[in-house]
Image: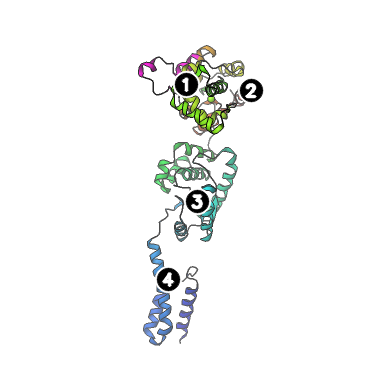
Amino acid sequence: MNDVLQKLINEAEAWLKSPESGTDDPEKLLTALQEELGKDKAAGRTLGPLIGQIKSIQNKRKNRLKNIEPINWVAIKQGRLAIGHRPSAKLITDIQLQGGSHILTLLSETEGARDIESKVQKEGLIWLWFAMQSADPPTEDRSHELKSLFADMAKALQGKASIYMHCSAGIHRTGMITYAFLRYLGQSPEIAKDNLRHLRETTWREVGEKRLLWGERFGSNTEAKPVISSKTIIYCDMDGVLADFTPEAIDLCSRILDDSSEVERYNVSKTARKAKRKIRNTLGPDWRPATSQDLEISPVKDMYFAAIGIAPGEFFAGLKPLADAMELLWPYINNSNHEVKLLSAPIHIRRGYSPEEEATIMTAEDGKKQWAGEFLNPPPSEIIITPARFKQECAKSDGISNILIDDREENIRDWNAFGGIGILHVVGDSAPTIEELKQLGV
Ligand SMILES: [Mg+2]
């Protein structure tokens, strides 16, 4: 046997031992072996089986590649990202075959995150995990964990990693975290949205503005901070800043749960009745709300929203003013050189009234205007009643940032994301709010 043939046989045997790690081109190897076989029929007994084995492995590979689910990698930094649905064992292999190095799982443990972990590790990929129970933005207390994950991912991309990110359907959680990550990497909102679209059109379309908005907080800090000008308008929320909503709502809930006779009229609302039953069944017959957090429990919220909806104007007109706001905050902002407007969210009138009945009922807007007329001196230059999710539309006017004083964290977050300056107000405590205004030069 000549040296060339022996070298070829050694090569073929080495490749067959570990076809995955071999850098040799098996097609080239096959051609060379077949050429030798043509030249030297006597070598057939050795070469034949080798050629057969290599061909069989190659055929299996070709068949496997025919069924592969293509991964849509998008180049980000020096690496690549892809996003999608929860990966099956096959998809994890497909990701590995297409150069994937990391898989980020956004599922909770109860959704089987650990199962994915073992499959990912079996394929020799690196598993990353940020457990999310729902499609709601992660709470503030997890931002540290998320930033440290983003830092690791950014580093991996620098090292040319290919990261596949997924939740269940690959829409809400995936879209939200991907956008936040792209913003973290320093991409502008436009570029980050563009990339999200390239990564997956469905996700880009369905992720929801709210989730993208949440991701803004990870945006680069180099963007210009909003500046106050003399034209900056101060928008002031009503409930929880000027008017004492919580005790009134707690009292209303307690009276409904007590079945007290003066709230019998609320029983016309099916939603209120259903919510009352649910509260009794889940929280017990003696449970009564005591704090503003209690008012956030969903059947509780359903119940008092439905009850207030029966006569919203009456409810809002009857709220007590908050003493600190009347004595300190309202005079302070009105003595500044800024225009002051009231920006407050309504509770809608109950559906189910006939148009004639409805015409006789005071709306939230009517009630709030009546309240402002009675308690706010001087009156605001305008009273805007709009659902909370639209408040942010007032964050800027003519390119100038406006101020919002509001007791809801998410309103402040959205306001800031839209270029405004939000001040989170603590109910009943105007001093820190005034301090923040002073620091802004107001
Ligand atoms: Mg409020």
Taking the image as shown, residue 197 lies to the left or right of residue 145, namely left
* Badge 2 or badge 1: first in the primary sequence: 1
Q: In percent of the image, x 54 and y 48: which residue is there? A: 109
Mark seen at residue 431? 2
Whether pointer 3 and pointer 1 mark residues with C-beta atoms closer than 8 Å, the reply is no
| Residue behind mark 3 | 77
Distance (Cα) linking label 2 and label 1 = 38 Å
| Residue behind mark 4 | 57
Distance (Cα) linking label 2 and label 4 = 76 Å
| Residue behind mark 1 | 266
Say what secondary structure mark 1 lies in: helix
Whether pointer 2 and pointer 4 mark residues with C-beta atoms closer than 8 Å, the reply is no
Distance (Cα) linking label 3 and label 1 = 59 Å
- Which label lies toward us, 2 or 4? 4
Say what secondary structure mark 4 lies in: helix
Q: In percent of the image, x 43 and y 26: which residue is there? A: 270
User: Which part of the image, by quadrant, shows the C terminus?
Assistant: top right
x%, y% of residue 375?
54, 13
Q: The magenta stretch spans which residues?
A: 349-370
Give the image's coloring scheme. rainbow
* Badge 3 or badge 2: first in the primary sequence: 3
Among the 4 quarters of the image, the one containing residue 326: top right
Residue 427 to residue 45: above or below: above
Say what secondary structure mark 3 lies in: loop
- Which label lies toward us, 4 or 3? 4
